[in-house]
Amino acid sequence: MCQTCLKEWHPAIAANKKNFKVKKGEVIFNEGDPVKGIYFVYEGNFKVHKRWGPEKELIIRFASKGSLFGHRGLGNNIYPISATALSDGIVCYIELDFFETTLKVNPAFTYTLMMFFAGELQESEKKMRNMAHMPVKGRIAQALITLQDQFGTRKEGAIGIVLSRQDLASFAGATYETVFRVINDLIKEGIVAIKGKEINITDYEKLHSLTQDSL
């Protein structure tokens, strides 16, 4: 918002934004809560997730520094998704009325947001296609590739975000037991290596080939 809005609008942003710290595991809002505003990530990582069956969840995407969430509530009275902090962080909160006014006043920001929505829609459609047609091993491979693409790698080569196996399962649309089994298979095949909860992709080409088998 600050990068693409008119400079003359910056004082209004400063007067209306609210920054606050969050703790790991803190729920920012729940699916079904009334829509009140939009959140921008200053620091930390967050998961955007949705109920999937009575006791399961599907992670739609991850939001990191520079990302936003809560926008799926635009045009709705309630949030269709939930958002939870995966680490300690800082978020910037903008109330819905001011956010909508900002869109009307700042065409460059509105265009940037529209392109973000288009990219997110494409990724959602791709994920739904994978859920329907890709074998579970391929979905887990794609999940690992997506995480490395978004978060990069640490100095030692591990994917730049540490997830629980349950969160990885929720992101890949699989069960915890299946993820545990597939990860062990990938380790035996020399495609990934594990150190604690960290995952290192050791053979990217072989991992990527698993996503192509049914496409």
Image: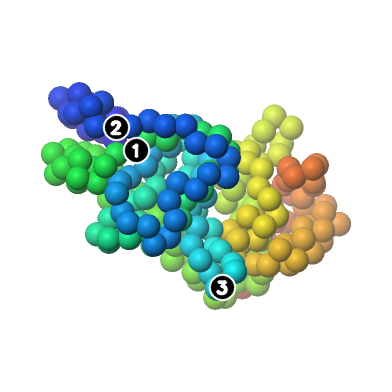
Element under label 3? Answer: loop
Up-down relation of residue 35 to residue 128 (above or below): above
Query: Which three-letter amino acid code belongs to the residue tagged 1?
Result: Tyr
Mark 2 near mark 1, Cβ–Cβ under 8 Å? yes
The spot of residue 67 in percent (x, y) is: 42, 41
Mark 3 Cα-neighbour bin, 10 Å: few <14, some 14–19, many ≥20: few
Q: Secondary structure at mark 1?
A: strand
Q: Is residue 47 left or right of residue 191?
A: left
Return the residue nearer the eye: 182 or 19: 19
Between disc 3 and disc 2, whose residue precedes? 2
Which disc number belongs to residue 93? Answer: 1
The residue lying at 58 percent from left, 40 percent from top is 24
- Name which of mark 2 and mark 1 comes first in the sequence: 2
From the viewer's perspective, is 68 left or right of 52?
left
Q: Amino acid at mark 3?
A: Pro
Look at 80% across and 47% down and name the residue there: 193
Tell me which numbered mark, 3 or 1, is placed earlier along the sequence: 3
Residue annotated with mark 2:
17
Q: Looking at this view, is 131 or 77 the one in front?
A: 77
Q: Is residue 191 above or below residue 92?
A: below
Q: Which mark is residue 54?
A: 3
Residue 122 in view (yes/no): no
Determine whether 185 is above or below 47 in the image. below
Measure the C-alpha gap from mark 3 to mark 2.
36 Å
Q: Measured along the vertical axis of the image, is residue 159 above or below residue 142?
A: above
On the image, the x and y values in percent for residue 41 come to 43, 37
Q: Quadrant of residue 15?
A: top left
Tell me the element at label 2: loop
Where residue 213 appears, as percent x and y from the top left, is 65, 70
